[in-house]
Amino acid sequence: MDIKEFGQSVLEQVQSFSDRLLDWLFARIPEDKRRLFFIVAVGSVLVIICLAVVSMASSRRVPANFQAMIVGPVIPPEELFYPGEPDFLPPLLLERDPHPQWTNEDLEVFWQDPKAGNEEKWREAVKAAVDKLMEGVP
């Protein structure tokens, strides 16, 4: 008997066993409930397989030399993270004179009249904004 004949005989035995099992099940289960029975059976088999995979995945043991298996340089936390903020206020400097208030002459250097030379552009921008708002009013 060679391997091919042995394989065929095993396959035939498995097929005959499955046929006998299905015939026995069909004889015991009412015809209107067979579909529900097979759906429940397949679902329970899938749940059992999933539970087995999850239990095998969660039961992995960490090897004792796990730290030795890590490869790479160790970066100190000071290089990765900003230092914490100080929880105190700086002292009040009494020897420093307070800043004087701004005068109109001081402000004239920085002031630019937004309307100078652009009156028509600003008028159109305001008109467009008002028209857009008025379109939304019922």
Image (cartoon, rainbow, N blue to C red):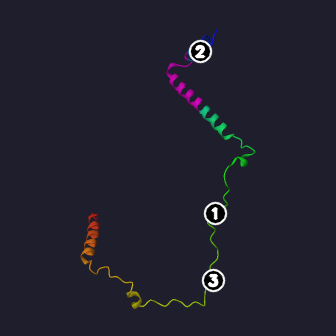
Q: Name the residue under label 1.
A: 79
Q: What element carries label 3?
A: loop
Q: Earlier in the sequence, mark 2 or mark 3?
A: 2
Q: Which of 31 and 105 is in front in this view?
A: 105
Residue sitting at 63 percent across and 35 percent down? 53
Measure the alpha-carbon separation of dots 3 and 1: 29 Å
- Percent across and percent down for residue 74 are 68, 56
**In the rendering, which numbered label is found on residue 11?**
2
Label 1 amino acid? Glu
On screen, residue 12 above or below 43: above
In the image: residue 88, left or right of residue 108: right
Q: The C terminus is located in which quarter?
A: bottom left
Residue sitting at 63 percent across and 38 percent down? 54
Of helix, strand and loop, which mostly describes the magenta segment?
A: helix
Label 3 amino acid? Pro
Judged by depth in the image, the label closer to the viewer, 3 or 1, is 1
- Percent across and percent down for residue 79 are 64, 63
Q: Name the residue under label 3.
A: 91
